[in-house]
Image (cartoon, rainbow, N blue to C red):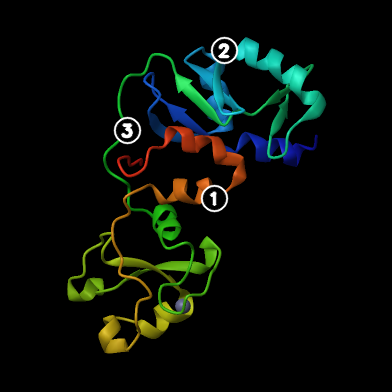
Amino acid sequence: MSQEERGRALNSSVLVLNRHYMAVRVVTARRAFILLYREAAEVIDIEDGQFCNYDFESWCELGQLRSEDARDHDDWVRAVHFDIQVPRIVRLVRFDKQYRSTLRLNRRNLFARDSHCCQYCGQSLPPSQLSLDHVVPRSKGGPTTWENVVASCVKCNTKKGGRTPQEARMDLNTKPRKPAHNPMLTLKLDNPKYESWKTFLPKGNWLMG
Ligand SMILES: [Zn+2]
C-alpha cells in the first residue's frame, strides 16, 4: 500500500452515530480511529443488510480475516503488523445528544448545494474555480444567506459585477434556497462507498453542520 493510498484512506469519510443510532456528524477516518482506539466509539458494519457492532479489537481481528478477499470500495490502512479496514460508520457509545439543527453557510456546503455548477452558465467546475456570488449584491444591501448566495464561475461573476440578475440580464438556473439536507452528505450518498450510510439517514428530518 503506497503512502498516497494510505493518506487517501485516512481522509475518507465516516458517518458518526450517537448512542441511539442517530446520525450526528461526518468525520475523517483518521478521527474515527482515534475515537475507536479510545473506546469512545464502536464500528457499525453492514453486511448482507444486517448490521453488527465491533469494538476496536474485534474490528482489527475481522479485518485480518477479510483482508484476504477485500470487497470493492473498501479502504484499508496499514498498522504495524496488519491491515485495518476503514469503517464507514461508527457509533459513539456514550454520546446522547442529537444532531445540530443549523447547517453552516460556507463555501464547501454552498458549492455542494449547487452541485459545483455555476448557477448562471451551468458549467461544472472544481471548487478552486468557483466563487460565491451575492444575487442581490452586498452594495445594494443583499444579505449573505442561503437564499441570496450562489456558486458562480469567475467569468459570470465578473460579467454580472455589482448588478442584480435582472439588471445584468443573467438568469439563475435555480432559485437558491436553504437545503433541507446537508448537501455534502447528499453528494456522498451518490458514491457506492457510502451506500451503508443510507440505513441511518432517514429522509427529511435531519440536518448536520
Ligand atoms: Zn458561469
Q: Earlier in the sequence, mark 1 or mark 3?
A: 3
Q: Residue shown at 61%/41% (left/top)? A: 193
- In this rendering, the answer to whether 44 lies above or below 198 is above
Q: Residue shown at 39%/18% (left/top)? A: 19
- Is 87 on the left-hand or right-hand side of 182? right
Q: Amino acid at mark 1?
A: Asp
Instruction: Answer yes or no: disc 3 within 8 Å of ligand 1.
Output: no
Q: Amino acid at mark 2?
A: Asp
Quadrant of residue 139 in the image? bottom left
- The residue wearing badge 1 is 190
Q: Amino acid at mark 3?
A: Tyr
Number of the front mark, 1 or 2: 1
- Is 131 on the left-hand or right-hand side of 13? left
Residue 157 placement (x, y as % from top left) = 40, 77
Residue 153 placement (x, y as % from top left) = 47, 74
Q: Earlier in the sequence, mark 1 or mark 2?
A: 2
Dot 1: element? loop
For the view shown, which residue lies furthest in the left direction? 141
- The residue wearing badge 2 is 55
Which of the two residues, 151 or 195, is positioned nearer the viewer here?
195
Q: Spatial distance from mark 1 to mark 2, Cα to Cα?
A: 28 Å
Residue 150 placement (x, y as % from top left) = 36, 67
Q: Which mark is residue 81?
A: none
